């Protein structure tokens, strides 16, 4: 990186907590936050070689090099090109190559073919990042106080966008590495975890609860449009498991022939099992002696029985819950349970293990009896991803960020061991298709009160 980009080891700037009316007071801090987030992306790729940088293992994944370029394209397209007079991209085709899905700003290079882009090479992509970074920092320094107040929220959106791609970068690398017999690794293995003990249940009474974020910027920090507006919801009394399901608990389902018993599976899920010959979680490997190992970003390691099960599809999560005579929580149940908890107390990407662990009770978690609600694994909910009552998709190309994906997907909550610390909150809505399982997705059970 250029010399003016500082290393992310400095104390982290909590830019997502700033209220809109106070943004001008954080002028210098926002430039630092920009540099920290941009450097963090580079730090994640420090152990990769040039061949790794162009690896694309399936259409849903993208090469690390593309992630580095696309996040630069986002700042270039929505900020520099629009608001920095005289700005010029290093190459006129970058707008086509690195546009992900924004139809409002032009055509996109086919997603499934990103791994075919040997050019620009990684050095050219890094030069592109330096070009954008210099222009962004110069632009921020030159803004009047009034202009800064109005533009800072768009910079913060860009930073959250890049943090989302940091997690995707890790999960896409892991999926690509899983095809290599050499078991490449870019992380250190996590120590075996202690037995968390029997699953406990926390009871929540029936009542009307609030869900989502206020649209009034003075009452909240940053939030994506799909988290709004705040609305009421009537909940029946329910119970939520004290922690995520572990590998040992999920292995019981597998050894009980859970993958071969149709009564536990949705019809679409059962067809998916048969078509794809699915018989275990994505990265599990059974050895000749009947034991299990797991592919991870630390290579192929023994399956830790007490770690949270992860890389589970919604189909598998539902089937396991059915087998346990339980269910998945709704996203409102999950949010209600997590609303008073500290969202940065779990295990996140900054810990650099990138393997889910149960961090134990900490902070507000100890008071609630709930473990690892944030970090460790994304937790599937039973809720389809759709708009909240009163949702209106923002105008312009940036309105394509979330709204156009509100069909045929399910909501996950809580973040994972690959999520940047400070990026998630109780109202945060992640979403994937029910078959998807290359993310750090796991299971927290729920059940109705008798």
Image (spheres, rainbow, N blue to C red):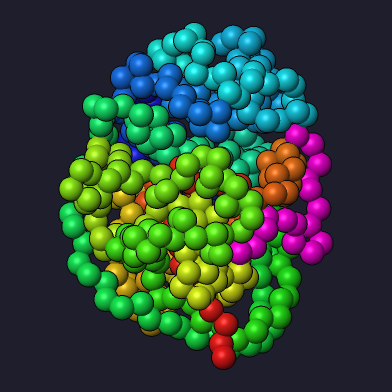
Stretch in magenta: 382-397
Q: In this image, 238 relative to 86: left or right?
A: left
Location of residue 443 in the rendering, given as x and y in whole percent from the top left corner: 46, 62
Q: How many marks?
A: 0
* Figure check: 245 above or below 386: below
Q: In this image, 394 relative to 192: left or right?
A: right
* Figure check: 112 above or below 44: above
Say whether residue 396 is magenta: yes
Location of residue 276 in the rendering, given as x and y in whole percent from the top left corner: 51, 40
Q: Quadrant of residue 110?
A: top right
**270 and 343: which is toward the camera:** 270
Residue lying furthest bottom: 450
Q: Quadrant of residue 121?
A: top left
Say whether residue 323 is magenta: no
Q: Residue at x 22, y 50 (%)?
A: 290
**376 and 250: which is toward the camera:** 250
Q: In this image, 170 relative to 48: left or right?
A: right
* Residue 190 seen: no
């Amino acid at each position: 990186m250029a010399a003016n980009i500082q290393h992310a080891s400095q104390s982290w700037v909590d830019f997502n907590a700033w209220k809109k009316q106070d943004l001008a007071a954080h002028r210098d801090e926002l430039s630092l936050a920009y540099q920290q987030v941009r450097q963090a992306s580079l730090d994640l790729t420090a152990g990769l070689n040039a061949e790794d940088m162009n690896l694309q293992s399936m259409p849903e994944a993208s090469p690390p090099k593309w992630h580095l370029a696309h996040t630069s394209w986002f700042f270039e397209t929505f900020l520099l090109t629009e608001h920095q007079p005289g700005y010029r991209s290093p190459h006129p085709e970058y707008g086509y190559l690195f546009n992900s899905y924004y139809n409002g700003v032009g055509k996109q290079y086919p997603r499934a073919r990103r791994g075919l882009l040997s050019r620009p090479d990684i050095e050219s992509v890094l030069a592109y990042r330096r070009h954008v970074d210099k222009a962004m920092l110069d632009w921020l320094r030159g803004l009047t106080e009034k202009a800064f107040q109005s533009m800072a929220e768009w910079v913060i959106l860009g930073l959250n966008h890049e943090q989302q791609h940091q997690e995707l970068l890790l999960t896409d690398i892991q999926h690509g590495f899983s095809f290599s017999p050499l078991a490449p690794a870019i992380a250190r293995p996590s120590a075996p975890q202690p037995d968390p003990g029997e699953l406990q249940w926390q009871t929540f009474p029936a009542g009307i609860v609030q869900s989502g974020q206020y649209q009034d910027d003075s009452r909240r920090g940053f939030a994506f449009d799909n988290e709004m507006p705040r609305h009421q919801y009537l909940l029946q009394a329910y119970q939520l498991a004290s922690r995520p399901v572990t590998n040992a608990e999920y292995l019981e389902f597998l050894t009980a022939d859970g993958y071969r018993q149709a009564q536990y599976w949705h019809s679409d899920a059962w067809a998916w099992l048969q078509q794809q010959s699915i018989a275990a979680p994505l990265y599990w490997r059974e050895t000749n002696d009947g034991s299990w190992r797991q592919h991870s970003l630390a290579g192929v390691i023994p399956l830790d029985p007490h770690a949270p099960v992860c890389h589970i599809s919604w189909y598998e999560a539902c089937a396991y819950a059915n087998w346990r005579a339980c269910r998945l929580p709704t996203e409102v149940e999950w949010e209600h349970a997590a609303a008073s908890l500290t969202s940065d107390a779990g295990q996140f990407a900054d810990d650099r293990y990138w393997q889910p662990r149960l961090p134990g009770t900490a902070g507000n978690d100890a008071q609630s009896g709930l473990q690892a609600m944030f970090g460790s694994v994304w937790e599937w909910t039973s809720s389809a991803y759709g708009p909240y009552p009163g949702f209106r998709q923002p105008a312009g190309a940036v309105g394509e960020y979330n709204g156009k994906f509100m069909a045929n997907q399910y909501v996950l909550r809580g973040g994972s061991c690959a999520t940047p610390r400070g990026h998630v909150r109780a109202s945060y809505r992640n979403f994937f298709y029910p078959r998807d399982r290359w993310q750090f997705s796991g299971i927290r059970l729920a059940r109705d009160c008798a």
